[in-house]
Image (cartoon, helix red, strand yellow):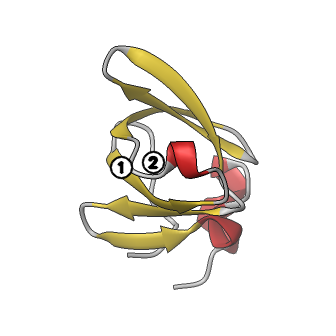
């Protein structure tokens, strides 16, 4: 999986993060900024920083550093 797809609406699990309390958080992505992803998990919204994290999607895993762009920029800049 590369980072050139739209993430909003995708199911995701945080597989690694510098904050251990965020590891294992899973849910649907409901928002995205340059530095964060907002996940709805168990009826609550959690804002998670992209850079110190790895995200597991249904199609594969992405490293947060490689997707730390605004969504409209990420689609152009991320290399497969």
Left or right of 61 on screen, residue 35:
right
The residue most toward the front is 20
Badge 2 element: loop
**Residue on which the image places disc 1:** 12
* Quarter occupied by the N terminus: bottom left
In the figure, residue 14 lies in which quadrant?
bottom left
Q: Residue at x 49, y 70 (%)?
A: 62
Q: Disc 2 and disc 1: Cα gap in Å?
A: 9 Å
Q: Which residue is drawn at 35% across and 36% down?
A: 9
Residue 36 in percent (x, y) is at: 68, 42
Residue 66 in percent (x, y) is at: 66, 72
Residue 6 in percent (x, y) is at: 46, 50
* Sequence-earlier tag: 2 or 1: 2
> Label 2: few (<14), some or many (≥20) within 10 Å?
some
Please determine whether, in this image, residue 34 is positioned above or below residue 47. below
Please determine whether, in this image, residue 37 is positioned above or below residue 62. above
In the figure, residue 27 lies in which quadrant?
top left
**Depth check: 13 or 57 in front?**
13
Please determine whether, in this image, residue 42 is positioned above or below residue 52. above
Please determine whether, in this image, residue 18 is positioned above or below residue 47. below
Q: Residue at x 51, y 85 (%)?
A: 80
The residue most toward the top is 43
Q: Residue at x 33, y 60 (%)?
A: 57
The residue most toward the bottom is 80
**Depth check: 1 or 44 in front?**
44
* Pointers 2 and 1 in contact (C-beta within 8 Å): yes
Residue 15 in percent (x, y) is at: 43, 62
**Residue on which the image places disc 2:** 7
Q: How many marks?
A: 2
In the figure, residue 17 lies in which quadrant?
bottom right
> Label 1: few (<14), some or many (≥20) within 10 Å?
many
State which mark lies toward you, 2 or 1: 1
């Amino acid at each position: 999986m590369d980072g050139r797809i739209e993430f909003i609406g995708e199911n995701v699990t945080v597989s690694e993060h510098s904050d251990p309390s965020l590891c294992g958080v899973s849910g649907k992505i409901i928002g995205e900024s340059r530095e964060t992803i907002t996940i709805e998990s168990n009826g609550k919204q959690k804002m998670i920083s992209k850079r110190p994290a790895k995200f597991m999607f249904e199609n594969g895993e992405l490293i947060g550093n490689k997707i730390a762009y605004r969504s409209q920029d990420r689609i152009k800049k991320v290399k497969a």
